[in-house]
Amino acid sequence: MKYVKEFGIILLVSLVGELLNYALPLPVPASIYGLVLMFVCLITGLIKLSDVHDTACFLIEIMPIMFIPPAVGLMASWDVIRANLLAYVVIALVTTVIVMGVSGLVTQGVLRKGKKGAEKK
Amino acid sequence: MTFFEQSVFFGVAVSLMAYGLGVLLQKKCRLALFNPLLISVIVTVAVLVTARIDYDVYYEGAKYLSYLLTPATVCLAVPLYEKLSLLKQNWKAIFAGIFSGVVTTLCSVLVMSRLFGLTHEEYVTLLPKSITTAIGMGVSEELGGYVTLTVAMIIITGIFGNVVAVAVCRLFRITDPIAKGIGIGSAAHALGTAKALEIGEVEGAMSSLSIVVAGLLTVVGASVFANFM
C-alpha cells in the first residue's frame, strides 16, 4: 500500500497543478504548478518527505524514458525541420554549449566571490 | 508485416530494449555518445521507418510513458527540498546564474537567427528552445511561432545538452556542483536535469530549480526579445 499512497499523493498534486493551469490564463504548464505546489507542501510540512520519497525517486530515475516518445515524434515533424535543417541544428548546438558555459561560470563566479567575502569578515 | 504495422506494444518494447542496450553500452564504454536516450531514439526511429509503422500507432502504446512526465516533474520538488539549506545559502549566485543563462539563450538565438537570415516567425519559434516543453509551446504559440518546430528544437537541445553536459563543464572548468547543476538545467531543461541527477544530488536539485526559474523568466524575456527582430 505504501507505493499506492505515495503515487496517489503525487497524482493529487499533479491534478491540482492541472486545475491551476486550467483556471489561470498564464502559459505555465500543470507540471510546473505541481512542482512549486509540491515544494511548498514539503516546506510547510503539509506533505511529509517520507510520504512521497521512494516513489518520487523511482519516477525521477526513469524520467529519461518518458522523453523517448516525444523525441521519436521528431520523425513526424521532419518536413518542418528539413526546410532549414542546417540553421536549426547549428543554432541548437551552439547556443546550448554557450548557455551552459555562461550560466555555470556566472554561478561559480558569484559563489567564489561570496566565499572570499565571507573569509574577509 | 501487417502485424507489426498495427502492434501497439512493438514500438515501445523496442524503445525500452534500445534504452537498456544504451545503458549497458555506456557502462562498458564510458563514451558520452553512447547516450541511452539518443540510442533509443535512433533505434526506434530506424525500426519504425523500416517496418513502416506510423508514428500514431507507436504513440498509442508510447503515450503511457509520457503520461508519467507531469507526475515525474512534480517529483523534482523532492530533491530540491532535500537541498533547501543549500538553496537558501546560495540564492544570489543561483539566481544570477539562471538569469544570465536565460539572457544568453535569448541573445544567442537573436544573433544566430540574424546570421542565418531567418524570418521573424522562425526567430520567435527558437526563442524558447532551452526551456521545458510545456512552457516553451505556450511561449511559441503566444508569439506566433511554429509550435511543432519549437517542440523539435527543445528536444534536440535537451538531448544534445544531456550528451555534452559533462564535457562542457570540463571545457569551461565548471567544478562546483551548484554551478554545474544551474548551467545544465538553464541550458537543457528536464533532459539536462536527467543527466545532472546522474552526476550528483546537488547537481540534480539545482538543475530542477533551473527548469522552473528559467522557464518563468523566459516567458517574460521572450516576449521582450520578440520585438528585436
Image (spheres, coloured by chain):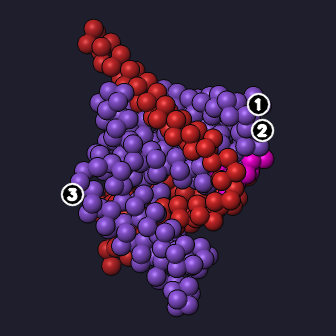
Chain colours: A red, B purple
Disc 2 marks which residue? B120
Q: Which mark is residue B85?
A: none
**Of pointers 3 and 2, the one earlier in the residue sequence:** 3
| Image quadrant in which you'd find residue B75 | bottom left
B32 up-or-down from B107: above or below: below
Disc 1 marks which residue? B229
Q: Residues within 10 Å of mark 1 (few under 14, many from 20)?
A: some
Q: Which mark is residue B28?
A: 3
Outermost residue, front side: B50
Closer-to-camera residue (B135/B35): B35
**Is A102 contained in the magenta span?**
no
Q: Residue at x 38, y 41 (%)?
A: B165
Question: In the rendered view of the protein, which quadrant contains the C terminus of chain B?
Answer: top right
Closer-to-camera residue (A45/A37): A37
Span of residues in magenta: B141-150
Amino acid type of the residue tagged 2 in the rendering: His
**Is B144 contained in the magenta span?**
yes
Tag 1, which secondary structure? loop
